[in-house]
Structure formats: structure tokens, C-alpha cells
Image (cartoon, rainbow, N blue to C red):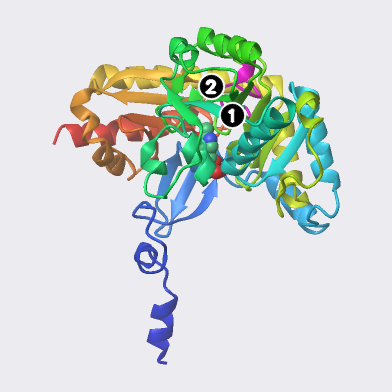
Amino acid sequence: MGILMILKKNIITRKTFDEVMLPIYHPASFIPVKGLGSRIWDQEGRDYIDFASGIAVTALGHCHPDLIKIITKQSCMIWHTSNLFTNEPALRLAKKLVDTTFAERVFFANSGAEANEAAFKLSRYYSIKRFSNKKTKIIAFKQSFHGRTLFTVSVGGQKKYSNNFGPKVPDILHVNFNDLNAVQSVVDKNTCAIVVELIQGEGGVRPANFQFIKGLRDICNKYNALLIFDEVQSGMGRTGKLFAYEHYKIIPDILTTAKALGGGFPISAMLTTNKISELVEIGIHGTTYGGNPLACAIAEKVFDIVNNKNFLQKVIDKGHFFFKILYKINKKLKIFQEIRGKGLLIGAVLKPKYIIKIHDILKEVSKGVVVLSAGNKVIRFAPSLLITKEEIEEGLERFFQLTKEFISR
Ligand SMILES: *Cc1c(COP(=O)(O)O)cnc(C)c1O
């Protein structure tokens, strides 16, 4: 092989994706190679303000020094033990989660879908053991998102994710979000669980009403059903509380969290109570990687940083600051019909006239800033919780200029 051929063979470009990867994604036209805080750089050295943080995952930004320190330290100790052993980082993290939440028991996994899979299996297992074989009905909500395994797409309320994979997991009903009457009309003694996102993330950044969540709690109590909060996206400081359920002051039976928990390292957790865990037996569920010491050491550090009054107050302040600038932008551009969300999970709903152009708008602004969509008409912002006001200003200025150019064409 000539030297030129060898060089050519090793050049990795966006085109390589189209040649070797399973074509289930449509990634951006550039490849990020470096990140620092809320800024990323591509192969050509161009920089972008990151308002997506890997879909609400890198909550402390890129290459946070404390996370670099802990990953280096733990990687010199022990990475993985499997569940033949327990390990110190997992026990420390679990203790902290138990000390700061409603929960008394913790199960670790690797992704949001796996935490939810465990939650759904556990709620059926518990209901069957404790009540009856027939108590398996799960009530979920339209537009909800709970992950991509077969059980979680079956529970999720978006057919585009669950169709064409053969028979779905049965005995799951979907009703309108924020509609208690709809829940009342389908709940019965065979309902084992109601699962809800406190802010529907992928479904369009739609917050649940207080009365709705309170009503779900009452219904669950009445029918001996478990209330599951999917806080995979809303948890770990994203809304300005450690978990969003604290805004509602309503306690679930099971809570799942992932995304921000590892700050970019894959880990998830399912939290629950002794009442439910009492019926669990050794071996009914498990995972090879879940709770491994490397992931848990990193998550413990993320937890220590996020679980701080001052830190969480700043998330709320920066959320307000972000909203304020978005309103200003909208005064000039008039492209949004509503701006909603909580803390640093923000959705800007496009006016009907711009909805069909959402992908073109996203593509255009991706020249200087990374933003997300949520559903088919919402532009979603989920920046690092440590983003500075200067970075918010700079990123939104880029967003404003690029959007302005686009709509004036
Ligand atoms: C992202 C997300 C999931 C799925 O998490 P994965 O890590 O992709 O499996 C589940 N529920 C909600 C609310 C999410 O936002």
C-alpha cells in the first residue's frame, strides 16, 4: 500500500459515518473533537456553544476538572467487579441517594431505558406477588418517552418508536397527559402502575400540572397502584431541584434517573422503597455493568457538586436569565408561540408557520450553537448546569443572528 493510500484510509470524516454505521441516526455535518465547559470544537477548529449537553447529560459541561480527577483516580483503583461483589463507590452513591430522597433502596443500571425497564418489571412483579396475577396494567401518557427497549417503547406514548417491531408488551394504556379524567376512565383494580414524566422531555418540554400529579398520587393510593416518576431527563438538578418531584412535593413509589447522573459517563438508577423491595428475591433481575465502581465514583462526584443549595439556586437564576433573553429574541423575530419549561430545561414552541421549517432552522443555527428539538414543533435547550451568563448571552446571540438570517431569506 502506498503512503497516500494509508493516510487516506485513516482519515475519519462525517462521510465515514454513512459508510460504516447502522443508519439509525442523522448526526450533524461536523464531528466534535474537543469540549470545554459549554463550548465544543470540531475537526476544523470551529467552535460552538453547547446548549444541548449531549441531550441533558453533560450537566457539568465538558471536561470538568473534578470529574477528570475522579475518573483518573478511580481508573487506577478498580473499574469493574460485576455483581459477584459490591463496591465502595456504589454503596457511597446509593447511601447519598437514599439520604437525600424519598427512597430507601437503589438499583443501578447503565441507561435510562434500563432503569425504566427495571421499574416496569418491578412494578408488575410487586403487584403480582402482593395482589394478583391479573394486576399488570400500566397506564402511561401520549407523547411520553421512556427509552428504546421493547418494554420501554411499548410504555412510551409515541408510536413511531414502537411500530414495526412485532407484538408489543401487552396491557399498557396511553391517555392524554395532564388529563386526570382520562386516567380515571381507564384505571381499575388491575392497574399495577402509572408512569409519568414530570416534564415531558422528548415529547415537547411539557410540564405536568400540580393538580394532575397530586391526582395521580391519589388514584394510585386508591387502587394500590405504584406511581413511577421517570426523571431520567428532569432529575439531577436540571430543573433547579435535585429531583423535579420536590417542586410538586408529591412522593412516588419508584423514581428513575440517568442522563445527568453520570455527567457523560453511562449510569442510571432506579430508586424505590422498602415496602416494594421487601418482596424482591435474589436473582429476579440484574445487569453485568450496572453499579460498576468507575461509573459510580464519577456519579458520586456529580452528585456532590449538584446536591448543593447554592448550585441549584444558580440553575434557577440562569434559567430565568435564559428565558428573559429568549423572550427578547422573540419580540424581534416573532417565531415562538410559547416558551416553557423549568430551570435549564427550556422549550420554545414554534408558531405554526415555522413548524414545517424546524429542521431547516436547527440546521442553520447548528453553524454556531448546538440546540435540540423536542417533538415536531419545539426547540429545546438543555445546557450545562454550570453554563455562565456570558456563554448564555453569546450562544443566544448566535442563535438570534442565524435564525434572523434564515427567516429573512
Ligand atoms: C432519555 C430518556 C430516556 C431513555 O434514556 P436512555 O439512556 O437513552 O436509555 C428515558 N426517559 C426519559 C424521560 C428520557 O428523557
Tell me what residue is drawn at x 45 percent, y 30 percent.
144
Residue 276 percent coordinates (x, y): 75, 27
Indicate which disc residue 231 carries: 1
181 and 20: which is toward the camera: 181
225 and 70: which is toward the camera: 225
Q: Find out if the beta carbon at label 1 lies less than 8 Å from the nearest ligand 1 atom.
A: yes
Residue located beneath label 2 in the image: 198
The quadrant of the picture occupied by the C terminus is: top left
State the extent of the magenta-drawn residues as a range.
236-246
- Magenta span: chief secondary structure: loop
**Are the two marked residues, 2 and 1, in contact with CB atoms closer than 8 angstroms?**
yes
Residue 26 percent coordinates (x, y): 35, 52
Residue 330 percent coordinates (x, y): 29, 20
The quadrant of the picture occupied by the N terminus is: bottom left
Residue type at mark 1? Glu
Residue 396 percent coordinates (x, y): 38, 30
Query: Could you say which quadrant of the image residue 361 lies in?
Result: top left
